Amino acid sequence: MIVYILRRLFYVVPIALAVSAVCFALVYLGPVDPLKAVLPADASLELIEKLKVDYGFDKPVPVQFAKWVWRAAHGDLGLSLATGRPVREEIARAISNTFVLAFFACSFGFSLGIAFGFVAGYFNGTWIDRVVTGFAVTGVSVPHYWLGMVMVILFSVILNWLPAMGMGAGGSADWAWDWEHIRFVILPAITLSVIPTAILARTVRALVADILTREFVSALIAKGMNDRDVFRHVVKNAAPTALAVMGIQLGYLLGGSILVETVFSWPGTGFLLSVAIFQRDLPLLQGTILFLALFFVFLNLLVDVIQPFLDPRIRRT
Amino acid sequence: MSITLRALAAFGLAFACATAGAQSVLRIGMTAADIPATTSQPDSGFEGNRFTGITLFDGLTQWDLSSADKPSVIVPGLATEWAADAKDRTKWIFKLRKGAKFHDGSDVNADAIVFNFEKVLKKDAPHYDARLVAQTTPRMPTVTGARKIDDYTVEVQTSEPDSFVPINLSNLFIASPTAWAKTKSWAEFAKAPVGSGPWKFVRLVPRERLEMEKYAGYWDAKRVPKTDRVVLIPMPDSSTRVNALLSGQVDWIEAAPGDSIAQLKSRGMQITSNPYPHTWPWQFSFVPEHPTADVRVRQAMNLAIDRDAIVALLGGFAAPAKGAVPPGHPWWGNPKFDIKYDPAAARKLLAEAGYGPGKPVKVKVQISQSGSGQMLPLPMNELIQQQMKAVGIEIEFDVLVWEALFNNWRIGAKDPKSNGAHAINVSFATQDPFFAFARFYDSRMVSPRSVNWGWIQDPEFDKLVAASRSSFEAKERDAALGRLHARAVEQAAFLFVVHDTGPRALSPKVQGFVQAKNWFQDLTPISMK
């Protein structure tokens, strides 16, 4: 097992390098100057050339890339071009805000998704299944951005029940786990949870429907096992796959959603990424993408490590 | 503690709470995606100067933002008077205001002023900073340095005689050297900035909010804020801004989108707008082999468009342009060519230039899909295209992303990467004569120096630019700029289309706001009902 984990950790190195190289290349392939973040829009070509020297952008791109990778390997992601603040600090602040949002979105989405999935799976082919499947298809298809705006118009603008944006009256610096602040997270969390709910519901429904047709379930029922114990066996068999799906969805949620965080002005990683893209803030963009990519890899690794504990068959293979 | 003492303490506490609760707060939803830099030289363009420049800091000079009717002009700020040296016009003497203090209590004196010039001009100074340079030097292109004459007199040096200096210097914001010296870092200074402006820094939550409170000791008693506190909140998404205003999370939003105005009004919001120094034009190429090199074609194009229809397209939140600045502006200059909608006159001019029904003029224009200050570029340009077609001008668009359009603006019409374009659609500020005129008409301002995109190489324009730069009395300078503007209109150097009116939406609680004809607005007279 330890060798397996070490091998998976070793894979992270080429992934990180590839992600950084792609980020670097994308920024340079675009039509925009890397100094856009610090320059007024109408700055002359003369000033741009002068500042390129000051910022080291006159060096060959491979040299710039190598320097950045070297510093990143030592934990220094550099300073944001636009704000001059350390990228590490910016990411840490944003990830903690996204974590709050993801926590609520997961709690809501996973519990609802699993519940819907089991109900639809158990009542496979009935009207209940069709209703749940209909909701799931709608959930996967509905655009986040649109749903968020509709909910804001309904619950904030018309009914005035919940806040339309932000992370509390004093911003994320004053966040507390009380109702005054939690009410700010409700709309973005519901918006963000719709797709994971739908995906999980569809996955669990298919798993449960499949497991219920297996011979061992018929054998358990034939032996006179009660429904609750049969259900327990179904859960145990569905858990590894459901867990893998939840891991991927958790990764997406913790990565932050650019659209949802922009609509709700939620200061998380998605919002940070969108700002970095629009400002062409190269160090911030690279740092954020690298961090998120590594985070995603780490989550997948975590799921891979947990799965064998839930399903002995995986251990045997 | 006796019962009486306890009662008194409880009463005192209750009174303090009530007083704190009564504090008036103005919350503003900005269009910027982040709080503009608080280093003393804001980023995010003029929105940055509007919210973290003129609020926290002062300049030597500043804009008069007190009137909604009169053109906004430069007035004394931390300097009470200034004049160019009669013997050497590359030197200016600024007399400083006595008694002005930074928020940390230190004096605003000549040392502080020189320190702030050095932060962007003296490369070997410990407080020189490339990021501040980037935000400042383009706005004061001829200023080279400053030195102290005495405690309240400063000499400012320029690379050439330049009468625009007092206007340019409104962009240099004066920070407290004492506050900088505590950490010797502008990044650290930005966490708790200290200026001498009417608002004092309270708290910054990066990317989320900036809180400022009134500075009761501000040197201009008339501009001591009437609101206790201002909170700035970045909201780049226009729908988010509208929803935040309608749900009561903010009291003021910038750039209210046209399609939300009716809804905002129906919910009792105040909509304010006023034309300000902004122009939405097409900048023409004067490259000899291009059709737009012929003044008759340029004039015909200016007569071919119905600006009222374009204003209607924008929901009324624009003003038809008759030049880079409107009639009545100090730089208007009474041009002889009247820009208006006259398709018959346009056809006549085209016929004189050798074009007609069988031989249309073909003009290629580079435009963007969106962009800051570009209003609604696609529908506006398509409407212009239809109107031009009606008089025999065929417009072909080369649509680029906003940043790419800016890059092409910098390289000029002669560069092969400009793809043979005859005009380019980049809106711009006309607040400052360098940005409104000099960079377009001065023959030296071609790429890479600036954005004389169309390669105007006209000795008459050069003479007028030089005359306006060397007219050192404000009235004389304005008259010279008027002559320059008149020639720009007569030569139809641009297709002058509309001026933006900067619509804002304010909650009914906001009282006393005067929307000046300026990119900047004064928050000090505002009170909250």
Image (cartoon, grey):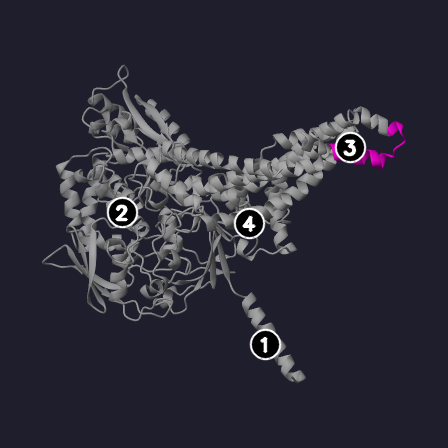
Front residue of B426 and A35: A35
> Mark 1 and mark 3: span between their CA atoms?
65 Å
- The amino acid on which the numbered mark 2 sits, given as a three-letter code, is Pro
Give the alpha-carbon distance from disc 1 to disc 4, as whole Å: 39 Å
Task: Kindly report the distance in space between the C-alpha atoms of the residues bearing marks 2 and 1.
Answer: 54 Å
- Residue type beneath disc 4: Ser
Q: Which residues are magenta?
A: A221-237
Same subunit: marks 2 and 4 = no
Q: Secondary structure at mark 4?
A: helix
Cα distance between the residues tagged 2 and 3: 69 Å
Q: Which residue is mark 2?
A: B138
Amino acid type shown at disc 1: Gly
| Mark 2 residue element | helix
Placement of the N terminus of chain B among the 4 image quadrants: bottom right
Q: Disc 1: which chain?
A: B
Q: Which residue is mark 4?
A: A96
Q: Quadrant of residue B521?
A: bottom left
Camera sees residue A241? no
| Amino acid at the residue labelled 3 | Val
Which residue corresponds to mark 1? Answer: B12
Looking at the rendered image, the disc whose residue lies closer to the viewer, 1 or 4, is 4
Q: Position of residue B360 (x, y in %)?
A: 28, 19
* Above or below, comparing residue B521 to residue A53 in the picture: below
Frontmost residue, A152 versus B120: B120
Dot 1 surroundings within 10 Å: few (below 14), some, or many (20 or more)? few
